[in-house]
Image: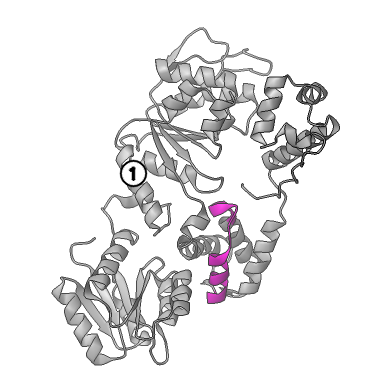
Amino acid sequence: MKQVAHILLVDDDTSLLKLLGMRLESRGFRVTTAESGRQALECLGQVRPDLVLSDLRMDEMDGLALFQEVQRRAPGLPVIILTAHGSIPDAVSATRQGVFSFLTKPVDRDELFAAIDEALSQAPGASDADSDWRADIITRSPQMERILEQARMVAASDVSVLVTGPSGSGKELLAKAIHRASPRSSKPFVAINCGALPEQLLESELFGHAKGAFTGAISQHQGLFQAADGGSLFLDEIGDMPLTLQVKLLRALQERQIRPLGSTTSVPIDVRIISATHRDLDRAMREGDFREDLYYRLNVVNLKLPALKERAEDVPLLAKYLVGHAAERHKPFVKGFSPEALNLLASSAWPGNVRQLVNVVEQCVALTSSPIIPEALVAQALTAEENALPSFNEARASFERSYLIKVLKITEGNVTQAARIAGRNRTDFYKLLARHELEPGAFKPGGEAPMGRAYHMSS
């Protein structure tokens, strides 16, 4: 919290306004008072407070309408609303729209000060002066704040960090934040998706290659380990790295040197490894798909990101941030979402997490013809996302499971025959069955075969 925080206090009851103002000043806050929403906006045009504390029920412009206008003029400025008419619907509506806290009058003094302190501590720029390291992560979720606190602590050391969590939850953003908060921040941050490239190309990208190392290698190529020298190398989707490359990666980390493809000379490296995956690596190790020794080398510290639905309080905040950036690029006249649209966004399940929210906001900005995005357009964008094609990996996994079910049905659960049809040995076939949670016994005569799994968006 800042040494002297500035609070804009708004209430149309002048006696309560004066009383509450004195209480805040006695706590050490600097207070500016306003007797209406309109007067509060005039004050906002002259000063930039650290927090707005407003009554809900006011003539002409109520607290929620004031909040909407505050967010348009000063995105991210925390707002706490007080009301003598407290109700669950009011609180739900307010928090879904992004109001930081909703307190009922007569408000308990300790409860009020606790809410103010929490709001000030989480406001953009309210932490220490070098908070730029986490500027790309928009949150007020206590769960995310704990993760960021851990990230800040681990950033100071040079240990390897494994970031886990569902696809689209922001793992690369957290990796970049760790890099920015580390002593290596002035050096490169280099990222690569280990599941997006064929094995030989991935090996060449990571370790480099000598001229003539393979067909098409017409010149020497510096790999990403060398490109990230002195900085951080982010290995996204590390769980999809082939086993043969896992061996070479482990050796590089142990020896702190690499050998480019086709070269006889080793090159020293100085990088901090941050890796990420949405896969269950414990299960992958049990199935023999991921090396245990590499896992413990990478997983010195594990930071697990929650799904967006687990931090639903961040949805309105993120939506406002994203619409502002999208509008700057495409349609400057777009100002934000209607309250009904924000409610719909906040109540959605977000199986695709933050990445899906980004897509929905981009669609809404692209299609809107009005400054305020209506609920109907949000509903249309959400429906379009639900009907979108799955990713290649999702489609492959769906086909693989369907194929296994068909083979098991044909062979009535006989794994030896099924593996022979699939062209796999029994060990590999059992691993495939375990990956897709299929039990051969369910396909024997009299067994109950599973239904096909419903498609869930995870990209």
Tell me what residue is drawn at x 76 percent, y 42 percent: 448
Location of residue 59 with respect to 124 vertically, above or below:
below
- Side of 287 relative to 424 (left or right): left
Residue 391 seen: yes
- Give the image location of residue 66, x and y in percent: 41, 80
Q: Please state which amino acid type lies under the numbered disc 1.
A: Gln
Tell me what residue is drawn at x 42 percent, y 91 percent: 60
What residue is shown with label 1?
150
Rendered image quadrant of residue 116: bottom left
- Give the image location of residue 266, x and y in percent: 46, 11
351 in magenta: yes
Location of residue 225 with respect to 157 vertically, above or below:
above
Disc 1, SS: helix
**What segment is highlighted magenta in the picture?**
338-356
Q: Residue furthest top?
A: 264
248 in magenta: no
Rendered image quadrant of residue 381: bottom right
Most frequent secondary structure within the magenta stretch: helix
- Side of 412 relative to 174 (left or right): right
- Side of 71 relative to 197 (left or right): left
